[in-house]
Image (cartoon, rainbow, N blue to C red):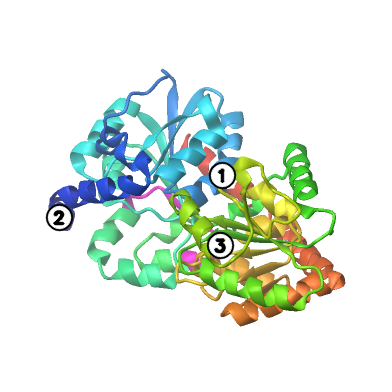
């Protein structure tokens, strides 16, 4: 009964969802395209057995890269169908995997859309990255005998409280799910409190620690560093995945840093969402700063800021810089991937909002590999210290890399659960 009411409510929301897509499409045209896929109208391009992997957006897609490569190697007779919900996530899937996988937007969680999608794709397994608990999707898979596995499961205290308010809807969902492979024991405890049977829970660690920095990526990072550093041998500060409200703080901190250090750093500023590229460029120029856009390859010795206005290059950017601020953390978004700079051996700066990476942030803070900054003044202070003290940069970077290396292995544990689910 509760799921029926949920479904009716979802159908009533459809006009508003379409309206929101249209409005988002005004600034990001990709949101005006491929609407049929969101209602299950997909056409598989290959006639193979299918593993369906769902990653909500960019972060989950990047986390899934080593998993996808492992699945392609271990299950060569299967074709992966990777779905997402956002245009930026779709771009990353195409950039990361090309034609080696099938791809579409995920169907909205309405019975007819989900049924239409399952009839056309016929998956043998659904793997959901991190935390996407869709009642109708999971119920439909359960009825058809399709195993559903929540991979790299993450459930913050805030999210658990939200799900707790609709526990009559969530508990049956968790009882019908095949397995939850959670990042940390605290995440697992929250899933259990919502009704997940203990027999279905595995604690694996975070598969984002299992990323691979290959020789091609290292070469690209070296090329960028040589291009950006200039004859002044200036430090390179990367501000990654920033959100509205953070760029202003970062630019204020940059002004403070430039006023006190002998050789001002180059700031490489990378907004999280491509629709903000032009807005952030205008903000930098209005602050009287010399800007070069990475996409135009016009970086010069006198550029004070490089705007990272391309998609899919952030990992190479990390490898080209001396220290990094990771965004989504000065605003209550929960923070973005702090494991990527750790894997490169970088000192890490963040804001205080880190609930998306609770365990990773704890590990990095305890190792003194990361510093938390509450405002522009504290961010500037930490940047000045890192610029002026190379031994500190090296010590923090080594500590970060040690944390990253010590926590690898989650992917192997996840693949074991997947193998058991596909029997």
Rendered view: 240 above or below 264: above
Alpha-carbon distance for marks 1 and 2? 38 Å
In the picture, measured across the screen, residue 313 lies left or right of residue 247, that is right
- Distance between mark 1 and mark 3 Cα atoms: 17 Å
Mark 3 secondary-structure assignment: helix
Q: Is residue 180 magenta?
A: yes
At x 47% / y 49%, what residue is drawn?
274
Circle 2 packing at 10 Å, graded few (<14), some (14-19), many (20+), is few
Q: Give the residue at mark 3.
A: 284
Tell me the CA gap for discs 3 and 2.
Answer: 43 Å
Give x and y (percent) for residue 14: 18, 48
Can you identify the residue that label 1 sits on?
310
**Residue located at (26% from left, 70% from top):** 165
Disc on the earlier residue, 3 or 2? 2
Select label 1 or label 2 by which is in front: 1
Q: Residue at x 37, y 39 (%)?
A: 30
Tags 1 and 3 touching, CB below 8 Å: no
Which of 395/197 is in front?
395
Question: Which residue is at the front of the view, 291 or 174?
Answer: 291
Give the magenta range.
Answer: 175-188
Foreground mark, 3 or 2, reads 3
Confirm whether residue 336 shows in the render: no
Q: Is residue 37 visible?
A: yes
Q: Which residue is mark 2?
A: 9
- Circle 1 packing at 10 Å, graded few (<14), some (14-19), many (20+), is some
Q: Residue 260 at what x, y percent from top left?
A: 75, 78
């Amino acid at each position: 009964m509760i799921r029926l009411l949920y479904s009716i409510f979802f159908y009533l929301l459809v006009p508003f969802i379409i309206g929101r897509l249209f409005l988002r499409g005004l600034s990001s045209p990709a949101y005006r395209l491929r609407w049929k896929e969101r209602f299950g109208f997909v056409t598989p391009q290959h006639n193979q057995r299918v593993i369906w992997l769902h990653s909500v957006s960019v972060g989950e897609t990047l986390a899934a890269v080593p998993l996808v490569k492992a699945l392609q190697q271990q299950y060569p007779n299967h074709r992966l169908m990777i779905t997402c919900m956002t245009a930026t996530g779709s771009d990353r899937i195409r950039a990361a995997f090309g034609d080696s996988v099938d791809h579409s937007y995920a169907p909205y969680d309405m019975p007819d859309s989900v049924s239409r999608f399952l009839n056309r794709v016929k998956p043998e397994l659904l793997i959901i990255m991190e935390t996407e608990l869709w009642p109708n999707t999971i119920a439909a898979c359960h009825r058809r005998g399709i195993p559903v596995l929540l991979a790299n499961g993450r459930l913050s205290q805030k999210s658990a409280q939200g799900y707790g308010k609709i526990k009559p809807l969530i508990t049956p969902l968790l009882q019908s799910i095949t397995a939850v492979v959670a990042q940390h024991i605290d995440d697992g405890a929250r899933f259990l409190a919502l009704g997940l049977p203990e027999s279905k829970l595995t604690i694996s660690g975070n598969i984002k620690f299992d990323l691979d920095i290959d020789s091609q990526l290292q070469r690209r990072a070296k090329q960028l560093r040589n291009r950006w550093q200039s004859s002044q041998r200036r430090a390179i500060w990367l501000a990654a995945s920033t959100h509205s409200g953070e760029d202003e703080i970062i630019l204020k901190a940059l002004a403070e840093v430039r006023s006190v250090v002998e050789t001002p750093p180059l700031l490489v500023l990378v907004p999280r969402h491509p629709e903000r590229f032009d807005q952030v460029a205008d903000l930098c120029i209005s602050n009287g700063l010399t800007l070069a856009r990475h996409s135009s390859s016009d970086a010069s010795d006198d550029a004070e800021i490089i705007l990272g206005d391309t998609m899919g290059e952030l990992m190479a950017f990390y490898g080209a810089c001396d220290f990094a601020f990771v965004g989504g953390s000065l605003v209550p978004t929960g923070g973005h991937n702090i494991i990527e700079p750790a894997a490169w051996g970088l000192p890490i700066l963040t804001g205080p909002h880190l609930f998306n990476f609770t365990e990773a942030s704890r590990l990095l803070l305890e190792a003194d590999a990361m510093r938390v900054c509450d405002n522009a003044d504290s961010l500037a202070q930490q940047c000045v210290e890192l610029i002026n003290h190379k031994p500190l940069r090296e010590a923090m970077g080594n500590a970060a890399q040690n944390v990253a290396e010590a926590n690898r292995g989650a992917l192997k544990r996840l693949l074991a659960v997947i193998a058991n689910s596909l029997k």
